[in-house]
Image (tube, helix red, strand yellow):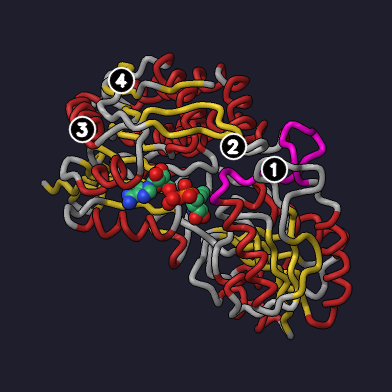
Amino acid sequence: MQAIEQISINGEWVTPQGTERFDLFNPATGDVIGQVRLASEADALNAIAAAKAAFPGWSQTSRDERIAALIRMRDALEACQPALLQAIVEEYGAPASRANWMARYPVSVIEEAINALKAFEFESVVGQARVVMTPLGVAGLITPWNSDAGFICGKLAAALAAGCTAVVKPSEMSALQTHIVTQALHEAQLPPGVFNIVTGRGDVVGEVLSRHPDVAKISFTGSTATGKAILRNAAETFKRVTLELGGKSPTLILEDADLADAVPLAIQAGFMNSGQACIAGTRILVPASRKTECEAALAQAVAAVKSGDPRDPATEVGPMVSEKQWQRVQSYIRLGQQEGARLLAGGEGRAAGCERGWSVRPTLFSEVKNTMRIAREEIFGPVLSVIAYRDEAEAIAIANDTDYGLSALVLGGDPERARRVAGQITAGRVLVNTLAHEASAPFGGFKHSGIGREMGRWGLAAFMEPKSIVM
Ligand code: NAD
């Protein structure tokens, strides 16, 4: 049992004034493996005050000073990778291949921020004006449980690169991973107050951050419902807001696709991060003319996906992060059947060989109408829907008939045709015949998938406002 008893304010470990303890679980067994002491409103206020006091100094640092600080941060995150990997498997249940990537990802997002900072144009001349990109002030960074270290480091590195100081409110469910990241940030010897880590409840610490007049910016990744609450709270003080929210992303298998290539990509896109990914391609659109063939190939591929113990190297889909998430996935599998969809693979219950914990059966539905709730709502688990379309125009219409607009995957034999289809999809990122991650391109969503973009120069600019000096 690990007990996380401290948070980080003003460069120091401090015991929170909050006294509530929150249980931490191993999703593979359902056992309690630790407890975290949660920060209170008073702790959040102290963290905001520390970030506010550090802002005048940090905002005046040179590009080189910020690059040096980010390099120290990167090195510290590199050194803690083995510990982080262990925590990701134990506390989150990510299978080995995904967990390895997740443990390395903080280093690569910090490197991306360094690259963006090196190239960033802080000043430009427009007519008679000198336009200076100016850091906003204190940034509140609120992150979810599905990639704790990656989101903390990505948002923090961009905020610091821009000259902002930060208060981070990580998910209370990822406290072991957050603790390792916080230790690394201390190792990096960043100036006191430029980062503060306050693990607490969303409706306590998160609310303080999104309402407080001394917080100029909120960068949030999480559910669409919470994003809406943050936007409302932030309106009162005109905070700048970046929201990275949910998705119900389409995978379009075009008529000329080679299924031997397309099906593995469609399955990987759908089951990414055990289905607990905002960008997961959960609606698979297949041509009606090839429906039987597509269904057979997809069903065979889903049935072959190994779900279960994350420590088994053969496992591709790990357990759901919590019992609540497990129940949610089960309820959608039941709902799909009640709505009239046909189960092609998987179903309710735990994965074969798992008697404990929150493993699920990778599930594939066919005969899904895009109006059904399983096709419209984010399930956040390995549950995929096959939807048939008549022609290309209908495929595009179905792909866009969603409240979300985060990501899409287009799979086809003719790259030109696939690119033309991609151009008509309303989504922040459209992948064509690849699952490659381009870390320097902007990331974010249309419609209910969010507001604004992270990564690259777009991510840095999101922590600044232009100021025109005219002489
Ligand atoms: P969540 O919205 O429940 O929680 C996210 C964070 O917000 C947590 O730290 C939580 O404590 C905090 N929070 C909760 N209520 C709050 C409030 N009233 N004010 C301020 N903060 C509050 O989401 P989750 O369950 O942790 O994560 C899953 C969701 O995140 C999914 O919907 C998924 O699609 C989304 N997500 C989006 C992206 C993206 O980049 N678009 C990436 C990963 C996850």
- Report which residue position mark 2 lands on: 92
Tag shown at residue 318? 1
- Report which residue position mark 4 lands on: 15
Of 461 and 3, nearer the camera is 3
Cβ atoms under marks 1 and 2 closer than 8 Å: yes
CA gap, disc 1 to disc 3?
37 Å
**Dot 3 lies on which element?**
helix
Identify the residue shown where x is 75% and y is 61%: 347
Secondary structure mostly seen in magenta is loop
Residue 124 visible to the viewer = no
In this rendering, is residue 338 above or below 169? below
CA gap, disc 3 to disc 4?
12 Å
First to last magenta residue range: 307-324
Cβ atoms under marks 4 and 2 closer than 8 Å: no
Q: Tell me where residue 39 sits by quadrant.
A: top left
Given the image, on which type of amino acid does mark 1 rest?
Answer: Gly
Given the image, on which type of amino acid does mark 3 rest?
Answer: Ala
- Report which residue position mark 3 lands on: 42
